[in-house]
Image (cartoon, rainbow, N blue to C red):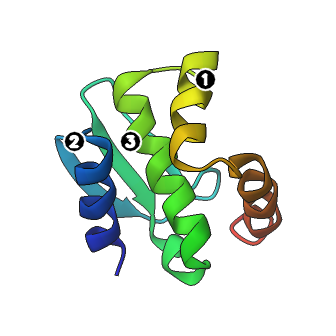
Amino acid sequence: MITPLVVKWQNIMHLYSTNLRYQKTKSQWGSCSSKNRISLNSYLCLLPIKLIEYVIIHELAHIKHKNHSKEFWDLVSYYLPNYKELREELKIYGKFIR
């Protein structure tokens, strides 16, 4: 269910991970390594699609910007103008993975 969304957004954003893996973590929904390897929390599949897509877009944006600079958030905002709302909603679900 999630992998097709990753492929969809990679193609839309023209940003491609070198590897995609899933793992259960207690502190984050996703990460992007310096080598553009994306790890996604296995529990993402329990979230609404809009939040799954937010996490995917967020991690793909890290392929281009390895930090949370203005340029990073501008890129996220280009694809998700309401990213701030989604980020706040995601924090609510984050309480359940700890």
Q: Residues within 10 Å of mark 2 (few under 14, many from 20)?
A: some
> Which label belongs to residue 68?
1
CA distance for labels 2 and 3: 7 Å
Which quadrant would the C terminus be assigned to in this image?
bottom right
Q: Amino acid at mark 2?
A: Tyr
Q: Which residue shows up at 75% across the image and 69% down it?
A: 93
Residue 22 falls in image quadrant: bottom left
Q: Which residue shows up at 73% across the image and 61% down it?
A: 90
Q: Which residue is mark 3?
A: 60
Which quadrant would the N terminus be assigned to in this image?
bottom left
Q: Is residue 69 above or below residue 5?
A: above
Left or right: 38, with 43 as reference point:
left
Left or right: 42, with 90 as reference point:
left
Q: Amino acid at mark 3?
A: Leu
15 and 91: which is toward the camera: 15
Q: Is residue 40 above or below residue 46?
A: above
Left or right: 46, with 2 as reference point:
right
Q: Does dot 2 land on a helix, a strand or a loop?
A: loop
The residue lying furthest to the left in this view is 18
Residue 64 in sight from this viewpoint = yes
Q: Which residue is mark 2?
A: 16
Q: Does dot 3 land on a helix, a strand or a loop?
A: helix
Q: Residues within 10 Å of mark 3 (few under 14, many from 20)?
A: many
Give how far across and how far down residue 68 sits, in percent.
Answer: 61, 23
Q: Amino acid at mark 1?
A: His
Circle nearer the N terminus (2, 3): 2
Left or right: 96, with 29 as reference point:
right
Circle nearer the N terminus (1, 2): 2
Give how far across and how far down residue 46 sits, in percent.
Answer: 57, 82
Circle nearer the N terminus (1, 3): 3
Q: Residues within 10 Å of mark 1 (few under 14, many from 20)?
A: few
